[in-house]
């Protein structure tokens, strides 16, 4: 089956993405406080312009990044010339990355954009060390939030099909946990953040390779 390209024509800006304003601190906290140290090496899938890689490198981690966007990789290399970045996506051959046995693979706000989300997990599984962690963030959806969206008339604007390059999949804690389990990962930590409980803006799930 032919995989649809992640698209190397997506143009990344140089500034920190909006998600970084509420994502980066929880990610660092889960790396430092919840996942048992020592964590040294991280693969950032969908690294974009390198903003998260720069943040984590500054926190003492060794970060390698991949992204199918040529503009994103160009920007990432400009701000982190000593880090390794590869212009590839999760539909490409993981062996194109020289590094292996990463302690953690991170993919922030990526899986909701993929037609074939299992490929992200399979890519991560190949590059992780034994018992390594996969850390995923994605917009949160659940029964209560979906009900509120419907009752307040915001369903169309929230799930708009008019956003070119927008979200393809809409994940709940249950569906993402099920996908992880089916692909050989065991969920160990869940964090919902932004807004009120069960109306969370996004969720962060840490799973360990079985």
Image: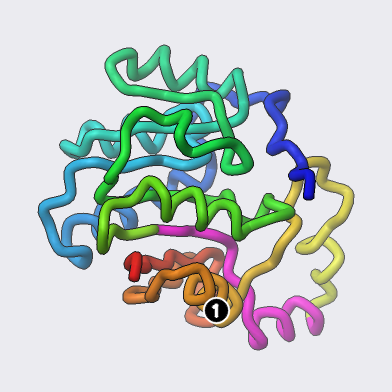
Residue at x 51% of width, y 55% of height: 122
Label 1 Cα crowd, 10 Å radius (few <14 / some 14-19 / many 20+): some
Q: Is residue 131 visible?
A: yes
Looking at the image, residue 100 lies above or below residue 181: above
Give coordinates of residue 116: x percent, y percent.
69, 55
Q: Can you tell which quarter of the image residue 138 is in? A: bottom right
User: Is residue 22 visible from the viewing direction of this image?
Assistant: no
Vertical arrangement, residue 125 with respect to residue 181, above or below: above
Query: Is residue 47 toward the left or the right of residue 2 in the image?
Result: left
Q: Position of residue 170 (x, y in %)?
A: 69, 67
Is residue 2 or residue 21 the one in the foreground?
2
Residue at image coords 67%, 24%? 11
> Which one is nearer the viewer's eye here, 144 or 174?
174
Find residue 150 and report its image quarter: bottom right
Magenta stretch in the rendered image = 135-151
**Residue hosting label 1:** 178
Secondary structure at numbered mark 1: helix
């Amino acid at each position: 089956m032919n995989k649809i390209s992640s698209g190397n024509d997506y143009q990344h800006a140089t500034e920190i993405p909006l998600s970084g304003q509420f994502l980066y601190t929880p990610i660092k906290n889960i790396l430092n406080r919840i996942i048992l140290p020592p964590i040294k090496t991280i693969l950032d899938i969908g690294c974009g312009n390198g903003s998260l890689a720069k943040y984590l490198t500054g926190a003492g981690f060794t970060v390698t990044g991949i992204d199918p966007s040529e503009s994103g990789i160009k920007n990432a290399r400009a701000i982190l010339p000593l880090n390794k970045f590869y212009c590839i996506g999760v539909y490409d051959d993981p062996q194109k990355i020289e590094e292996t046995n990463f302690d953690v693979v991170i993919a922030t706000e990526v899986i909701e954009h993929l037609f074939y989300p299992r490929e992200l997990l399979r890519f991560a599984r190949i590059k992780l060390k034994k018992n390594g962690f996969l850390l995923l963030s994605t917009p949160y959806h659940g029964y209560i939030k979906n009900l509120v969206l419907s009752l307040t008339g915001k369903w169309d604007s929230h799930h708009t099909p008019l956003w070119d390059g927008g979200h393809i999949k809409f994940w709940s804690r249950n569906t993402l946990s099920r996908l992880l389990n089916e692909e050989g990962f065991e969920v160990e930590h869940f964090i919902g953040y932004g807004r009120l409980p069960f109306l969370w803006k996004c969720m962060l799930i840490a799973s360990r390779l079985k």
